[in-house]
Image (cartoon, rainbow, N blue to C red):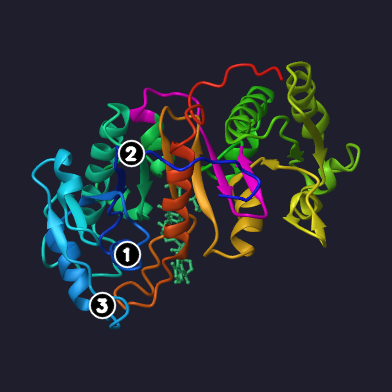
Amino acid sequence: MSSSISTTPPEARLPLALTLGDACGIGPELIVRAFAKGEAEGCVVYGDAAWLAHTARAMSFTPDSSRPPVVALDDLAQWQSAPRGAIPVLPIVRLPEDLAVGQVDARAGAAAFACIEAAARDALAGRVAAVVTAPIHKEALHAARVDFPGHTEILQHLAGGVPVRMMLANDQLKTVLVTVHMALRKAIDAVTTDAVLQTLRIAHHAARAWGLRRPRIAVAGLNPHAGESGLFGDEEARVIAPAIAQARSEGIDASGPYPPDTVFMRARHAPPEHPGAFDIVVAMYHDQGLIPVKYLGVEQGVNVTLGLPFVRTSPDHGTAFDIAGRDVADPASLIAAIRMARQLSAQPTVQGEPGACRT
Ligand SMILES: NC(=O)c1ccc[n+]([C@@H]2O[C@H](COP(=O)([O-])OP(=O)(O)OC[C@H]3O[C@@H](n4cnc5c(N)ncnc54)[C@H](O)[C@@H]3O)[C@@H](O)[C@H]2O)c1
Ligand SMILES: N[C@H](C(=O)O)[C@H](O)COP(=O)(O)O
């Protein structure tokens, strides 16, 4: 993760579960590319060995980077016996051969869900060190009658409904969202004092576990210019400020609400031009928090679910149906997600119930 997060090398005892994602998207080719680059060492793919082998055959490789062999495991316990450089696959699903890459297909949605479920089960049972998820397509999931919008909500459900928050992070910026996958009209109503306070507690707890003694958390407003003293809305004074005050009384270094259009610029850590006034920005809704991180470079960003009893990371991009199957997708964000999962899972207290935090 960021150079500002202290880490220790992971114990190599448990593998990372790497889910296949939507087979019609770029996930499978990114997984092959990550293994070919030697960046997925210690990962076991929860997916379909035949589909991955087929994907690998369709990709081009130079003499410096050869096509990794795919090995189907009978059991997770066999993962360490796979040859070095091979792609070990726990065959959770068998995908139909007539799936068309680049298209929404309920069968791909159902398979993606089965892989996530299996990985989460193993993470909850302590059989894997972390879960890294390749991208899924939300329409395919919906077509498969999976009643969750994304991984965040699926994993929250499988973990028993614990409070979770989505964080998007790169080396320069970390944002944690109060609301995630919902219509903007609903998101505005879902910005409550309790939801903001819970976000602050979860973000503070997670950042402390990364090694920040007193994380500086900026809170974005909801309205333009954070309401301009009530001229453009009163949620800042009525809803957000009381959450900040309560968090501060609990020892959390929260401040704001700040004008949303400039708070990310102030938090950006890229010295010397951008010294970074804050460690984390709490954003009120999905696009407010995700656009600044993705705009800095979709290849750098990592999505982390905070609050789960296990580590879960993901690339910050989606299934990219427009380029799937063309062998042009950039594996950098998936590789960053794998690296971050290794680092965070080496931190014993990174996840879990935050409660009220006093420093
Ligand atoms: N982690 C996840 O599971 C995840 C994350 C984001 C979006 N999604 C889902 O993915 C689906 C498609 O979303 P979208 O089209 O809005 O966003 P997208 O990220 O899939 O694609 C947006 C643009 O970025 C490009 N792009 C994305 N990843 C790339 C890569 N690795 N290399 C090169 N170019 C890349 C695409 O070609 C496209 O032009 C939606 O269903 C969305 O909800 C899933
Ligand atoms: N909101 C995420 C993004 O835009 O990157 C994406 O939809 C993935 O969400 P899950 O991790 O919940 O699948």
Label for residue 189? none
- Picture coordinates of residue 68, whole percent (x, y): 22, 68
Q: Is residue 48 magenta?
A: no
Q: Amino acid at mark 1?
A: Gly
Cα distance in 3D space between marks 2 and 1: 20 Å
Q: Which residue is mark 1?
A: 25
Q: Secondary structure at mark 2?
A: loop
Do labels 1 and 3 touch, CB within 8 Å? Answer: no
The magenta span reads 157-177
Question: Would you identify the image quadrant in which residue 58 lies?
Answer: bottom left
Depicted 214 relative to depicted 111: above or below: above
- Picture coordinates of residue 171, whole percent (x, y): 63, 54
Q: Which residue is mark 3?
A: 59
- Image depth: mark 3 or mark 2 in front: 3
Q: Which residue is mark 2?
A: 147
User: Residue at horizontal 32%, vertical 54%?
Assistant: 41
User: Residue at horizontal 16%, vertical 62%?
Assistant: 70
The mark nearer the N terminus, 2 or 1, is 1
Left or right relative to 89: residue 255: right
The mark nearer the N terminus, 3 or 2, is 3
Residue 95 seen anywhere in this rendered image of the structure: no
Q: Is mark 3 within 8 Å of ligand 1?
A: no
- Image depth: mark 2 or mark 1 in front: 1
Question: Would you identify the image quadrant in which residue 127 lies?
Answer: top left
Depicted 59 relative to depicted 25: above or below: below
User: Residue at horizontal 37%, vertical 29%?
Assistant: 157
